[in-house]
Every structure is written in structure tokens, then in C-alpha cells.
Image (spheres, rainbow, N blue to C red):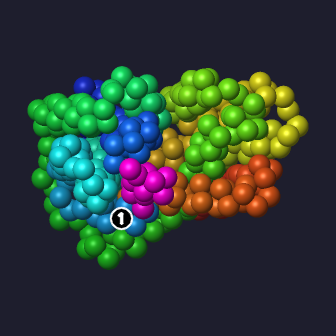
Amino acid sequence: MRRADAPTRSDWRAVWLVVVAGVASAFQLGKVAIAAPQLQTELGLSLAMLGGLGATFAVLGALGGVAAGSLVARAGDRSMLLLGLLATLLGSVLALATGSFALLLVSRVLEGLGFLLITVAGPTLLGRLVPADDRNAALALWSCFMPAGIALAMLTGPWFDDWRNLWAAAALATGLILAAVTWAVPQQRARAEGPRPLVRMAEVWRALPLATSFLLYSLMFFALFSFLPVLLQQRLQVGPETVGLLAALASAANIVGNLAAGLLLRRLSRAALGGGAALTMGLCALGIFLPVLDPRAAFALCLLFSAAGGLIPASLLSAVPQQCATPAQAALAVGLLMQGSNLGQALGPLLVGRAVDSHGWPAAAAWVAVAALAMVVTLFWRPGARAA
């Protein structure tokens, strides 16, 4: 039965603005990587310091996903999206005046808080803007925000000869998006008091298998993409002049998978789509990391790995409305999923990096294969997965 406050038609203009806000938040994640040489030269940052700047988003997400979901549930999805954009804007502006690592780290914390609020509020807001028939398509579009934002940072970053100019451009774009969202995205209607928080949280924990699946997907994805430039040079013998182009191409393949998910979910169950994608990633990892294929075939598997991975976020996010009776519960569930995603983003490079240091690239194949099998078990073990 459709809720009384459910939309009767999709507001696609607002949907696109929400997705653009997500892309802007992911851009902040990618800009440190592309500006790393400039930051090292001007501020004298070590690789460990750069790693700390890059890991800020993942750590905040791993610790605060559910808390962000609670804020969205209490204060409203649009308000928290605007607050996330504002925090992102302030973080970028603060960095412009800094000449120290400490202040730059503080600016990254602000940007990371903005990223967390945007990524939790975004899917919740989309669920309010579109009716059930369009929800899979809207969430598939939303799932493109991460690879699109990072790819945009990789492509535009070299245009700027000073990292401060890149930060200033990001701040300007974020300010324009903030204004557009304020003007075009409708406010949430006042609603009656929902369930008590403890009851709501108890119901939201039903989404724990989804969050676990997101953790395993993120671990697999970043197990490859955190080391892809190194892998391309060491394992696939790619020259340094083409590494960036091939890495961007592999990232773009993930967008194809995200968009395809909206169509495939009309024909396949979420468990079947997510499980099939996970198995594909696991099998691809064997060909990528084990020295059994020539470099061209191994890179083709990198593209397939990325595209198959793109099917998973939309399939997991689209299950949230089926498990949550109210928008407030959905906000908390999305927060839990984002917490799992960020935890996997933090664990993947750490676990796989140590394994490769000790046992070589085949150890990475073992980690991804085990994670893929664990994800399949988790998806089909979830109550109601066969009917999803």
C-alpha cells in the first residue's frame, strides 16, 4: 500500500541536483590524491600525512554512519543535505588560508563530515522525491556519485598548477550547488511523531546484513583500486605515462554497472544481482592478481571487475525501503550501510596491502575471493532475500 505522503510522480530536476551534490562530495575525496605532489612540495607532507588526509573520510564514515542517519531522521533529509554541503564549503575555504598540516587536517574533517551527511541524506531524500516505480532508477543514478566524483577530480585536477586553486574551484562549485538545492529541492512535509527511537533502532538493525554486504563489496573494490596504479606498473607492465588513463577508464566502468543496475533490478532479485556481481568480482580477481594471463587480458578483467561492482550499491540501497516502514527508519538504515561501506574502504587497503607485502599479489586474489563468497552467503542468508 502506498503511503499517503508518497510522491505520485518523480521530481527529476531535484533528483539530478541531489546526485550532483553527491558527486561534489566525492570530488573532495579524490582531490587530495591528484594534488598530492603539490601538497608534498609546498607543505612538505610525508606519504603518511597524505594518507591521513585521504583516510579522514573513511574513518569518519566508519565511526559515524549511524549517528549521521539519526541526524537525518530527526532533522530531515533536505536540511542535512544542505548542512553537508555547507560543511564541505567551509572545509574547502578553511584550507585556502592554511600553511600547516594541522589546519589542513581540520579542513578535511569538515569536508568529511559534509561527505558523511550528504551520502546518508542523499538516498533518503531520493526515496522521498520519487515513487516506488522510479526508485531503482533513481538509486542507480545516485550510486554513480562516487566513481563520477573521483574521476572528475582525476580529470580536472591537472588543470590547476596550485592546489589552492583546485580547492577554490571546488568551494565555488559547492556553493553553487548549495544555492541550487536550496532553491529547487522541496522541503519535507511535516509528519506525525514516529516510533520511539529505541524501537526504530531495533527495527533498523534488520538492515545489518545489507551493511555487512556493503562492507564486503567496499573491501573488494578498494582492494583493487587502492593499488591499481602500482598493479598496472608492477604486475601488468604498464608504462607510467598511461597508468592514469587506464586507471580512469577502469573507474569509469563502475559507472556503467551502476546505471545498468536500475534496468537489471526489474528482472532479477536483489540477492541474485548482488550475489552474481560479487562472484564475478571474485573470479576476476583471480585472473587479475594471479600471474596466469597476459597484461591485456588482465586489464580487461579489471574493467569487468569494476563494472560488475557497480551493480552492487544500487541493489543494496534499493532494498532499504523494503525493510523500513518510515523515512526515519530508512535514514538510519542508510547510515548503517554507509558505515559498512566506509569500514570496508578503510580495511580493504590495510588488509590487502599487508598481505601483498608478505606473500605477493596472489594474496590479494585470496582476500577478494573470500570476501566475494562471504557476500553471497550474507545476501542469501538474509530473511526474505529470495522474495526481494
122 vs 334: above or below: above
Q: Which residue in the protein does label 1 denote?
A: 64
Q: Given the current orientation, which residue lies at the most extreme right position? A: 292
Residue 223: x %, y % from top left: 63, 49
265 vs 111: above or below: above
Task: Give the image quarter of residue 289.
Answer: top right
Residue nearest the observer in this picture, 111 or 335: 111
Residue nearest the observer in this picture, 37 or 301: 37
First to last magenta residue range = 44-59
- Magenta stretch containing residue 184, yes or no? no
Residue 387: x %, y % from top left: 59, 50
* Residue occupying the point 33% across, 26% down: 160
Q: Is residue 336 visible?
A: no
**For numbered disc 1, what is the local secondary structure?**
helix
Count of numbered circles on the image: 1
| Image position of 166 (left or right of 132) | left
Q: Is residue 193 visible?
A: yes
210 vs 146: above or below: below
* Residue occupying the point 30% across, 32% down: 162
- Dot 1 surroundings within 10 Å: few (below 14), some, or many (20 or more)? many
Residue 11: x %, y % from top left: 25, 29
- The three-letter code of the residue at mark 1 reads Gly
201 vs 102: above or below: below
Residue 334: x %, y % from top left: 39, 55
| Image position of 90 (left or right of 46) | left
* Residue occupying the point 72% across, 57% down: 357
| Image position of 193 (left or right of 59) | left
Which secondary structure dominates the residues rendered in magenta? helix
* Residue occupying the point 21% across, 62% down: 74
